[in-house]
Amino acid sequence: MRPCESARLVATQLSVLATLGALPGLPPCSRLDGEPTPVHDVRGDLLFWRLALGGRGYVDIAAHPRLGAPLVAIAPDAEWDPCALLAEAAELGIEHDGLEFVAYSFPKLAVRFRRAGAEVALRELHTWDQVPDPRREHGTPPGQFERWSFLDEQSAEVGRDHEERYHQRVESLAHLANVLHVHEPVVRLLDRRVVEEVLRPHVDFRELLYSHRDADHSTCVALRGQETNTWSVAASVQIFLDFYRYRYEQDRLAYELGLGTEEEPVGLPHSREFDVVLALESLTGKSLTASMNKHPNFGEYRAEIRANRPLISFVPGHARVVAGYTRTSSLRLMGASFAGLLVYDPWPPNAGVIRRWENVDTTVYRRTFTARVTLLD
């Protein structure tokens, strides 16, 4: 599907979510404008387009059906200037005849340098460090700073399911766009009565606050950037502990987790992921009782957020913190439904960090870490 048509369908979905109050923070009358930036999979396939959102922020729109849904993610406040990034990459002095953006560890990005059709370098955005080749054994998850293919990681069965779901969503959103008369890729507030009549929707939304009294205070999660390519776990633990008012510098957390030093950082081995639980408990003097879930699902994210507790979320090759969720279901047009998580992402290292809503249908979740305040008898 052409990027302009995909943008129209995604604009329709975002307009509905904004109208229903299911996705706050979207600027009114925001056009998905500019030239779509293609982002490729490591193996070379076009994976998604990134489009600017009204001059600030961006929206990621699926180009490959194996992502499972047209809307991949939206970051209303993030900066995205692809021309400036490519110009900065060109100044590295690497001989090339072509540059392209690559999701080297989805959703983390790099710039691939090509010469005569072959890759000569793959440099991470902002740090411009060379992304290492895969170092893992077959069947094990990727490391914290390692290239891996989003498409190759999917089994044939999962890929077919994602493609089928993608085409169903496209068909439903095309019908919705026609009914609501959305003819351009513009996110705008619609007539709520018409939207409710067409969809008969149910909206469920919450962000983390200081307490359950939503009316008298605002979001209380602070976003911290990872200080090295491999310290997303340390940064996520820092964000998590900040929420509970425990202040630790990231190098101290890296020491507790065995992640090396800033000069010689390492990632957290998969065999030691439970160390996150031990660190959360020891660093709070057992004031927090932590746990790890090897099979996370949307229900767990929803339950923890409704209890006003953040989660550390592991995806392949990366760690982030989840601090909100949104879910809109439709009784009349199931393909227009949406479930998303509010992610506080510490990447990229020391270069600005990202707060975005990601579609749960386009993301692979490996682990979650949660904690409850220990109650004394």
Image: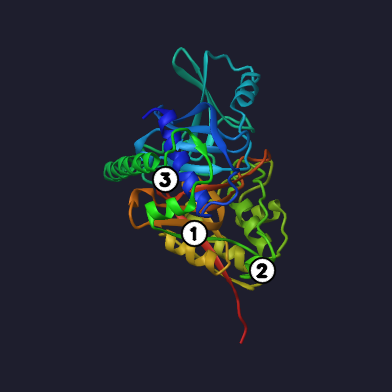
Q: Secondary structure at mark 3?
A: helix
Residue at 59% x, 17% y: name it. 94
Q: In the rendered structure, are the residues bearing label 1 and label 3 in contact, judged by CB atoms less than 8 Å apart?
A: no
Up/down of 114 relative to 46, above or below: above
Badge 1 marks a residue whose secondary structure is strand
Identify the residue at image location x=36%, y=45%. Answer: 139
Q: CA distance from mark 2 to mark 1?
A: 19 Å
Q: Earlier in the sequence, mark 1 or mark 3?
A: 3
How far apart are the alpha carbons under marks 1 and 3? 17 Å
Total numbered badges shown on the rendered structure: 3
* Residue 11: image tag: none
Residue 20, horizontal then vertical, whole percent: 50, 54
Within 10 Å of disc 1 (Cα), the crowding (few <14, some 14-19, many 20+) is many
Q: Which residue is mark 3?
A: 362
Task: Left or right? Give the position of 106 relative to 247.
Answer: left
Query: Which of pointers 3 and 2 indicates the residue nearer the eye?
Result: 3
* Pointer 2 residue: 284
Q: Of the residues shown, which amino acid type is indicated by label 3?
A: Thr
Residue 2 image position (x, y, % from top left): 39, 27
Tag nearer the camera, 2 or 1? 1
What is the three-letter code of the residue carrying label 1?
Answer: Thr
Q: Nearer the viewer, residue 29 or 74?
A: 29
- Mark toward the viewer: 1 or 3: 3
Return the residue at label 1: 368
What x and y, as percent, mark residue 227?
Answer: 67, 44
Dividing the image into 4 quarters, which one contains the C terminus? bottom right
Where residue 373 sits, quadrant-wise, is: bottom right
User: In percent of the image, x 53 and y 67: which residue is there?
Assistant: 306
Mark 3 Cα within 10 Å, few/some/many (few <14, many 20+)?
some
Q: Is residue 5 above or below residue 165?
A: above
Q: Secondary structure at mark 2?
A: loop
